Each structure stands twice: as structure tokens, then as C-alpha cells.
Image (cartoon, coloured by chain):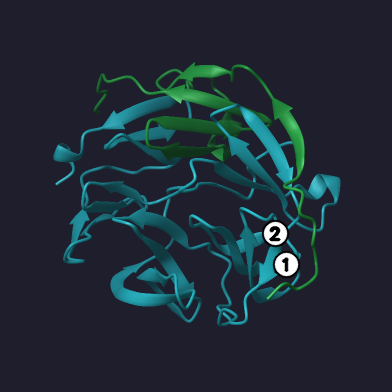
Amino acid sequence: MNNGYDRSRHHGTVVMTTSTLPYMDLFSVFKTKDYSLNFGRAVSMEGEAYFIWRNQIINLMPQTRSLNR
Amino acid sequence: MSNLASTFAISSPNGKVYIGSHDRDYDWQYIKLYEFDGGINQLTELPRVPHGVVTPKYVYATDQYLYIEGGLADVEVTDRYRYNLQTGIWEKLARTLPLTGYNNAMKPFPYKGGLYSFGQVNLDDPYNSLQVFNPISEVWDLVKKFEKNGSLATNEPLLIGNDLYLLYGWENLKVDMRTYEEQKITNLGQIAGFYLCYKRAAFYFQFGDTLRFDTDLLI
């Protein structure tokens, strides 16, 4: 099954480790009028949500208030 | 690197996030792959994906493997690879994808212990399909083809309970995952940007604004 492209058993190179991630409130993260925000990607898991934008991984913390339009 | 997640960012059953990045400005001929562990806030670069695809057709993860399948390089590629998350070894799958002639990525999502995928499978057949992943044979089986074409406006399908929300723009769909019955949603207005599903609620991001929509209002 192994095609021989990469037989390394190393899981890789640590690029970044921080004690805390940049934090942004979910409702304020897009207040910045920066079109490049539309090229970011949001990822959610149980109890966690991240927004990956440019070179940053941002810890999102959704609030409970609803802003229906 | 100008955009860490320019190609994809997916969550995995192991609680980690897998990120693909391709940047033509840096003349990369392949996707750079990263693993983000939010428990220790650590970003690790993983061994590169073996093929030169820069826009994969499928990217998804199981407990054991990260799969990157098909897509476009200079030409369409049908090779499928899986990365063993325990050993850190790339393996080529024996079965390839059919040629699709299309570069729109499928959108995999987990549901009740299974793995599903939604999107346009083939250029010659623009209608959207729901597929389910068979973890034994490692192939995608058709569940249902819908009378809806076009590509989703969302980064991922939104699953809230048993309801799958497929957001395109003007006309959107809700699919009951228990019966696969579909229902059109037309009162959401035009949408763009992307979405995040978090704790059974859906958040809508658009340039300059962030909204949470109440799914009770969608019908």
C-alpha cells in the first residue's frame, strides 16, 4: 500500500506553539472592513471554533445573543 | 505564506484541525499540510501530500487517516492518498476516483458516526449528490441525487440536529438526514461569505458583519 513517497515516521516539524492563541469574539471578528476576511476558513468542533485567516489561527468564542436580520 | 488555509481546513475525529495551504506566489508545486492541536496550541507541518494537486476533490479525516483525493494540478488527477495519523506515512489507495472534469471540491461532513459528502461529482452531471463513505471499501457510495445544481456558498454544510442546511445564495436547501427529503429555503436573502456551525447554532459571516441566524426563521 505504501507508495514510497514518504516513509518518514516523523510526524513533522513544529511550526508554532503558543500558550494562548489570538482571541476574537465571534461577533466582532468581521467588523474590520477587510475583504480578505472572506478568504479565511472557519473550523468548528465540539466546544471549539477557530478562524484561520492569513497566517493566524484565531480562537473564536461565539456569544449566545442572537442577531437575526 | 500569505494564507495558511488557502486550500482547506477540516476538523478531525481526533480533535485536531488539518490545514492545507498552497501559494503560487511562493511557487509551491504542492500543498503544504499542517496539523493544529488546539489542546496545546501547536501547529506542526506534516510530510507533504505525494501528488501535485493544489485543489483536491475530497479532503476528510477518520479516526485513523487523513484522506486527500483527486483534484486538479496542471491536469486532473484521480489518485487517492491517505495519511496514517499514527505512523505519519502516506499511502496510495488502490482504487482511483473517476474522472470528473470538474474542480469543485466535495464537502464532507460527519453525521451519526458516518461520513457523508455533498456536492457536484461530475461536470457532465451538474446536479448535487449526497454520498456516504464506506470505511471498509474506502469508496464513496451515492445516497441521493438532488434536483439542485451549482456550488455551495459555504465552507462546509451546516448540520444542526438531523437537518442539513445547504446554502448556495438565493435558493437554499434543507435536507432531513433521516429521510433525505429536501425542502427549499428562499427567505434567507442573498448570502455570501461563509458559515460556521457551533453548538447547534449557525453563524453567518459576511464582509464587514457577523450574524447568527435562527433556523426557526428559515422555513
- Asked if residue B214 lies left or right of residue A36, the reply is left
Q: Chain of mark 2?
A: B
Mark 1–mark 2 distance (CA, rounded to whole Å) = 6 Å
Q: Quadrant of residue B143?
A: bottom left
The numbered dot on residue B54 is 2
Counting residues from the start of the chain, the first of labels 1 and 2 encountered is 2
Using the image, determine if residue B164 lies above or below residue B58: above
Element type at mark 2: loop
Q: Position of residue A68 (x, y in %)?
A: 24, 27
Q: Amino acid at mark 1?
A: Ala
Query: For this rendering, which residue is in front, B34 or A56?
Result: B34
Near-viewer residue (B155 or B65): B65
- Quadrant where the image shows the N terminus of chain B: top right
**Dot 1 corresponds to which residue?**
B73
Q: Is residue B182 above or below residue A57?
A: below
Amino acid marked by disc 2: Val
Point out residue B113 in the picture as x, y percentages from the top left corner: 33, 57
Q: Is residue B48 above or below residue B187?
A: below
Going 73% across and 36% down the picture, which residue do you hit? B2
